[in-house]
Amino acid sequence: MKFAVIVFPGSNCDLDMFHAIKDELGEDVSYVWHDETSLDRFDAILLPGGFSYGDYLRSGAIARFSPIMKAVEEAATAGKPVLGVCNGFQVLLEAGLLPGAMRKNAKLKFICKPVALKVKNSETMFSMAYEEGSVITIPVAHGDGNYYCDQETLASLEKNNQIVFTYESELNGSINDIAGITNEKGNVLGMMPHPERAVDSLLGSEDGLKLFKSIVKHWREQHATTS
Amino acid sequence: MMIFEVKVTVTLKEGVLDPQGSAVQNSLHQLGFDTVEGVRIGKIMNLRIEATKDSIDDQVKEMCNKLLANPVIEDYRYEIEEVVSS
């Protein structure tokens, strides 16, 4: 399976993402610079964390208009797995590939620590290797992770089971403690916690590895049935 | 074509919590300014645009909706002034 890690000017978790896929997951992975225009050769798209364009104007607001984003939208429409972590999540929100927006953390602090997450939906292509309701530990590192959407959007997120991860205890002011959501189709996931930083018990947790294993498992199943 | 100075003001929508505004409000209260009932923090962007009188308004609106503001959480308003060369 071929993964793409999109690199924007100011991305800084791209190496961690690359390492997680190549060394821990053992799959094929390449960096794709933001001014490229095609992702046809990839099976899954990863938007890493960082501070694309210095977080100028709003987090993700400028990266969202990078040339590569058209290809990301096409990949999402085609049903390929698209994962945005932290700043990658913010880019997906700004691009309208996921509903809602990010505000500054309620207490204005940059929060950087391992947090407990509940797996709310283990039926997505990103979470099928987890047990539903299980609690996992994955680090966060963000200043703008305070998720917001209006009540109508929240109701539809809940109704369609689009909330995949929630914080076990109040963290940054996010509505309903939301840590990660998918689009309606379930092939685009945005999350503030960093699964790519939790892929080796030597470094504190390997709870994030199952997320990437889920993507591979789902992809293999799809290909076994269609070929 | 004419030159316009455009001042765009972007603020968080009413009802969207503004953590920066709340922190500044608390600080003002600590300084004794008890009369302050609300603080909202926003951004001001000054743009210089060459356009025709007929198109300037639509152009600014499009810029605000596409990039300068995030309509999910922010409102915007703008003032357009024609630059008169001396």
Image (spheres, helix red, strand yellow):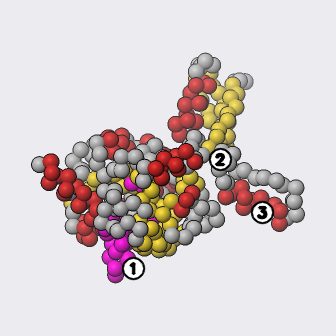
Q: Residue furthest left?
A: A227
Q: Residue at x 28, y 53 (%)?
A: A44
For marks 1 and 3, give the CA distance. Answer: 38 Å
For marks 3 and 2, give the CA distance. Answer: 18 Å
User: Can the viewer see residue A15 in this picture?
Assistant: no
Q: Residue at x 19, y 57 (%)?
A: A220
Up/down of A21 relative to A32, above or below: below
Q: Nearer the viewer, residue A81 or B32?
A: A81
Q: Nearer the viewer, residue A203 or A186?
A: A186
Report the residue marked by disc 2.
B12
Residue B26 is labelled as 3
Q: Is A118 included in the stretch rendered in magenta?
A: no
Q: What amino acid type is highlighted by mark number 2? A: Leu
Q: Residue at x 28, y 62 (%)?
A: A214
Q: Is A201 included in the stretch rendered in magenta?
A: yes
Q: What amino acid type is highlighted by mark number 1? A: Gly
Q: Residue furthest front?
A: A159
Local SS, label 3: helix
Q: What amino acid type is highlighted by mark number 3? A: Asn
Q: Are marks 1 and 2 in contact (CB under 8 Å)?
A: no
Local SS, label 1: loop
Up/down of B52 relative to A162, above or below: above
Measured from the top left, where is residue A72 in percent x and y? Answer: 34, 45
Q: Which residues are magenta?
A: A189-211
Q: Are marks 1 and 2 on the same chain?
A: no
For marks 1 and 2, give the CA distance. Answer: 38 Å
User: Can the viewer see residue A27 in this picture?
Assistant: yes
Measured from the top left, where is residue A26 in percent x and y? Answer: 21, 67
Give the quarter of the image for residue A193. bottom left
